Amino acid sequence: MDNKGLLFIPDISGFTRFVNEIEIEHSRFIIQQLLEILINANESGLEISEVEGDAILFYRFGEPMELETLYRQVEKMFCAFHQHLISYNHRRICQCKACVSAVDLTLKVITHYGEFTTYNVKQFNKLIGKDVIVAHQLLKNDIEQHEYWLVTGSLLQEPPAGLARWMKWNSSTKQTESGEIPFHYTQLSRLKDEIPPEMPAGLELEEKVKMVSVSRDYAVDIKTLVYTVVHFEFRHQWQVGVKAVDEVEHFLPGVGSRHRHVLDNGQQVMMYTSSFAYNPEEKILFSETDEKRKSSTYYTIEKSDGHTTRLTMDFYLQKNPVRQLLFTLTEKKRMEAALRESLERLDGVVKEMVLPLEF
């Protein structure tokens, strides 16, 4: 049994090959996150041979895994995969084609038992053997849907009874260089119905008082203005006192994600995105709250008429009469002036902004 074992390949599909630079970058981030989620959902002691683009080659030497145990591993990865996509679809801020279509990504899992061996390339255990080739060839087949679990005849001779009541098994074969490989497969999409709905994050201040409000109209469309305002890489170009905004998580920002405001005076303020509502036909709302939950800034972007769009910036404090009084006496005028200057600077930035295709 030293050279026999399980080959387990979860494979992501559904992304078109985007030509826009931002969409390529964002699709890369999304796939990276999903691959990490699949790896973290490994609870069966599977080893990783390599990450192959949108797929992972897992393996485990030894006797075949019990089918029930194998299914629980497939189920764990599939549900974690879609839980993340559902959550991201609720939290996402970016409206590029990659981010909008991420929720439609699919996952299939190929499981095969056979002979193979390993060889080392630096810290990686690469696999070699005819059954490794077979497993990869099984990724391309005639199954129309793209969310299924495929089990070859080396692991499953007959469709199982009682594994899951909703399962319907189909049989087929794949012609490979090693001959005809029989397999069974079942669709997994039903599992998505059992994923709990996304719950509101509850990140906004429960009791807040508006302390400052400034507005300005811009001769641009609403999508261009919101793109400029909510993307952190442009913030230092127009917001007074901000040197840079760093994303402290490596994944794409969304409601609940944290970012760091690096100020001109050297101070660093940790913030998180506390809300986002997107309706480009009327208005778009975006808010940031400091990590200590003492203040929030709301950005409301709405159409003024057919040719202009208005941005309103509202600064709130957590309700506290003493803090409110001190702010009014010592900080309000200075903040209001800085926000108005920021809106003036934004006019030059937004006029030069080129919106990505399909945003």
Image (tube, helix red, strand yellow):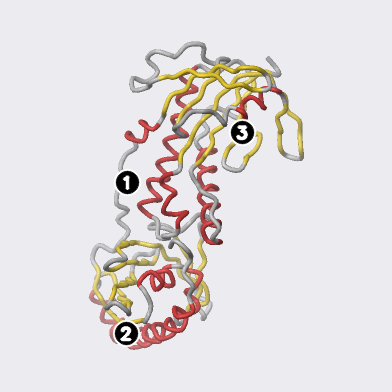
Distance between the alpha carbons at the discs numbered 1 and 3: 30 Å
Query: Which residue in the structure is indicated by mark 1?
Result: 198
Q: Amino acid at mark 1?
A: Glu
Q: Amino acid at mark 3?
A: Leu
Q: Nearer the viewer, residue 43 or 265?
A: 43
Residue 48 location in percent, x, y?
63, 34
Number of other residues with Cα within 10 Å of mark 1, as a class: few under 14, some 14 to 19, many 20 or more: some
The residue tagged with tag 2: helix, strand or loop? helix
- Give the mark nearest the N terminus, 1 or 3: 3
Residue 54 location in percent, x, y?
57, 42
Q: Nearer the viewer, mark 1 or mark 2?
A: 1
Residue at image location 40% in from the left, 18% down from the top: 163
68 sits left or right of 36 in the view:
left
Query: Which residue in the structure is indicated by mark 3?
Result: 57
Query: Which residue in the structure is indicated by mark 2?
Result: 332
Quadrant of residue 116 in the image?
top right
Residue 313 location in percent, x, y?
32, 76
Of all residues, the one furthest to the top in this rendering is 158
Q: Nearer the viewer, mark 2 or mark 3?
A: 3
Q: Amino acid at mark 2?
A: Lys
Number of other residues with Cα within 10 Å of mark 2, as a class: few under 14, some 14 to 19, many 20 or more: some
* Quadrant (top left, top right, bottom left, bottom right) of the C terminus: bottom left
Q: Nearer the viewer, mark 1 or mark 3?
A: 3
Q: Does residue 293 sit above or below 53 in this rendering? A: below
